Amino acid sequence: MPTLLIVIASTLLAGLAMALGAAIACFEKIANEWVEEEFRHGVMAFGGGALLSAVALVLVPEGIENLNPLSACLWFIVGGLTFMLLDIYLKKINTPASQLAAMLSDFIPESIALGAAFATGNSSAFLLAALIALQNLPEGFSAYRELNSTSAYTPKKIIIMFSLMAVLGPIAGVSGYLWLSDYPEAISAIMLFASGGILYSIFQDLAPKVKLEKHWIPPMGAVLGFVFGMFGLMITT
């Protein structure tokens, strides 16, 4: 299969994980209230673990290869600050779509980086694709619950919207594949920018919502999410 088609398929499938997460949230009905609460918190923790593994095992190691330490740190900090400012803005306008905005904010630059990784023949490209899908699943789950809490969005409308947004993945991935493969510094900057933003999102949006009083299982979701990324790295290197 031509590499360009692989880029399109990989980014599209990773994007459709958002709709799958929304569908799980739509049909998720557990009779026991505490079990349901633990499940939801565990899903968020898993998403945090997958995000952290993407940062620690792929985005940062790849990003620092083509930049000097000062530039690398600068782009990482700029990413975190940008996501923070976006968070402040969304809070100010009181939108019910903060999780949705955060999900797209890391999905798009990651897809650009993924397309560029395939163009340069990077061995971790498939691992990055898998991690993007893994993180989009719980992010779609959380974003669905956030949007569904308002009367403006029906379950069907949310799932369709998430499915259509998956197309942004191939657009971003093809852009990275066609135009950024000759600019390794730009790819590294995008990876580190996304890393800083993701790390901010983990501790701002996900980690604070994971803990449950007198319940210790949900944080294991973060451990399992990170293990998926670690296992993927070990079998591809």
Image (spheres, rainbow, N blue to C red):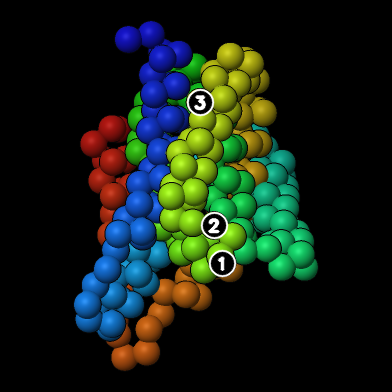
Look at 48% across and 70% down and name the residue there.
207
Looking at the image, is 234 positioned above or below residue 203?
Answer: above
Horizontal arrangement in the rendering, residue 231 relative to residue 16 (left or right): left
- The residue beneath circle 1 is 150
- The residue beneath circle 2 is 153
- Helix, strand or loop at label 3? It is helix
Report if the CB atoms under discs 3 and 1 are less than 8 Å apart: no
Mark 2–mark 3 distance (CA, rounded to whole Å): 26 Å
At label 3, the amino acid type is Pro
Report if the CB atoms under discs 1 and 2 are less than 8 Å apart: yes
Q: Residue placed farthest to the top in the image?
A: 2
Q: Which of the 4 quarters of the picture holds residue 7? A: top left
Q: Quadrant of the C terminus?
A: top left
- The residue beneath circle 3 is 170
At label 2, the amino acid type is Tyr
Can you give x and y, in whole percent of width and height, for residue 41 in the image? 37, 72
Crowding at label 1, few (<14), some or many (≥20) Cα neighbours within 10 Å?
few
Pick the front one: 178 or 53:
178
